[in-house]
Amino acid sequence: MTSIFKISAAALLCVILYLAFWPVSVRPVAWQAPEDAGYQGGFAANDHLAALRMIDLEGRIGPEDADIGPDGMIYTATHGGEILRLGPEDKIEGFAQTQGR
């Protein structure tokens, strides 16, 4: 029993020594981080929404989606399934009722 243990331990030691001194072509090199470029490009500060004007949808929940129609009006869908048309000077008109489908 002890001879099997000694043979197993010797084989394990040989495998460990083989793997520890195994020649590899990889040489470790420290990674040099690039210099921080700051906030520019896609990360630059912008004020595109500074002039944003909120439109009251008169108690409706939404909008869920919005698009500009061929007539230049804004069309938007609400949570209740109503499609609204927003006219000049933020005039809101019910355009269609889809019942949420």
Image: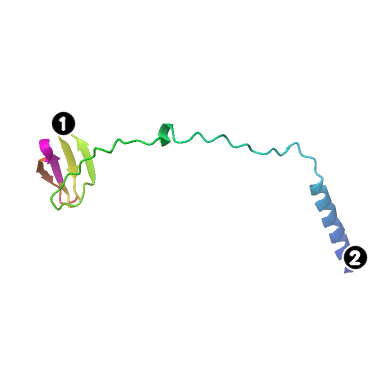
Q: Quadrant of residue 77?
A: top left
Q: Amino acid at mark 1?
A: Gly
Q: Quadrant of residue 89?
A: top left
Q: Nearer the viewer, residue 18 or 66?
A: 66
Q: Residue 67: where, in percent of width, then height?
A: 21, 37
Q: Residue at x 21, y 46 (%)?
A: 63
Residue pointed to by mark 1: 72
Q: Secondary structure at mark 1?
A: loop
**In the image: residue 28, left or right of residue 57:** right
Q: Residue at x 31, y 36 (%)?
A: 47
Residue 49 visible in the displayed image: yes
Residue 49 falls within the magenta-colored stretch: no
**In the image: residue 25, left or right of residue 98:** right
Please provide the residue range marked out in magenta. 83-90
Q: Secondary structure at mark 2?
A: helix
Q: Residue at x 56, y 34 (%)?
A: 35
Callout 1: few (<14), some (14-19), or many (20+) C-alpha neighbours within 10 Å?
A: few
Q: CB under 8 Å between callouts 1 and 2? A: no
Q: Amino acid at mark 2?
A: Ser
Residue pointed to by mark 2: 3
Seen as rendered, the residue at the extreme bottom is 1
Residue 84 falls within the magenta-colored stretch: yes
Residue 87 visible in the displayed image: no
Seen as rendered, the residue at the extreme right is 3
Q: Between tags 1 and 2, which lies in front?
A: 1
Q: Which mark is residue 19?
A: none
Mark toward the start of the polypeptide (1 vs 2): 2
